[in-house]
Amino acid sequence: MSLEADAPHRRIRSFVRREGRMTDGQRLALESLWPTYGLDAPAQPLAPATLFGREAPVVFEIGFGNGDHLLSRALNEPQHDFIGVEVHRPGCGRVMMLAEKQGSTNLRVACHDAVEVLRDWLVPGSLAEVVIYFPDPWHKKRHNKRRLVQPEFLALIVGALKPGGLLRMATDWAPYAEHMLESVRATPELVNLAPGGAYAERAQTRPKTRFEARGERLGHEVFDLLLQKR
């Protein structure tokens, strides 16, 4: 997911495209299941109801990785529709392959930059919930500007959310958690729903991902944030 840089015609990217190994099944899923589950850039911003053929609350997950959280919620919450965005094609292929096996009909996947999807692909105010779990923390101070969660990006999310819509975030990197809180405090359209305006309880809908398990093995605390659009 990319953020605009100050210099003209230059973009700062908050991700590195580490393609990794793609299995035959993932490759086949990308080729054969894209018409069913894939989401391409529309000619003009679209309403999610046109994708799913119904009016339902839409959950938008950014950087879903291998898709465990996205798939779990799509299967367990048939009353909701889900859009997942991930730049790494093996993860997109895996999600579509498993969604097809499970018979999921309430899931779409974009293998693209989430900034552009939020800004250009969707009608403003069309999302019920946005999820960002364990984004790349960019540990080095000189790389902090590459972090996805910045006030400018939160402004995009605010524009995409319905009034009363939720933003859920989590990280196992304490400095990034503090950075997230600072960015939220600089975004008056978002209300922190945690007591005292700090960190929230772990969402019951969030299965423990391999990123969270790895962080726990390293002794990292996990920080959750729960925000609501005014």
Image: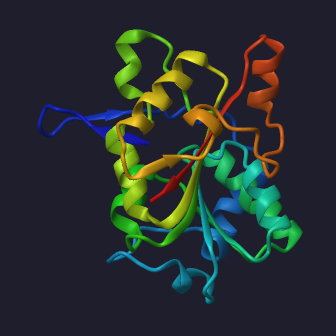
Residue placed at 82% from the left, 49% from the top? Answer: 204
Depicted 135 relative to depicted 96: above or below: above
Question: Percent x, y for residue 184?
Answer: 44, 38
- In the drawing, does residue 62 fall left or right of residue 112? right
Tell me residue 38's x, y (percent).
Answer: 59, 68
Q: Nearer the viewer, residue 78 or 129?
A: 129
Q: Percent from the top left, x then y, of residue 124? A: 38, 70
Image quarter in which the C terminus is found: bottom left
Q: Residue at x 39, y 68 (%)?
A: 121
Q: How many marks?
A: 0
Q: Residue furthest front?
A: 196
Quarter of the picture holding the N terminus: top left
Q: Is residue 35 left or right of residue 13?
A: right
* Quarter residue 150 falls in: top left
Place of residue 137 in the rendered image (x, y in percent of width and height, measured from the top left): 53, 23
**Colouring used for the render:** rainbow
Q: Is residue 134 left or right of residue 105?
A: left
| Residue 212, above or below 28 | above
> Most extreme residue toward the bottom, as rendered?
53
Identify the residue at horizontal 11%, vertical 37% (top origin).
8
Q: Nearer the viewer, residue 230 or 180?
A: 230
* Residue 44 visible in the picture: yes
- Compared with 214, 197 (above or below) is below
Q: Is residue 137 visible?
A: no
Find residue 27 and report its image quarter.
bottom right
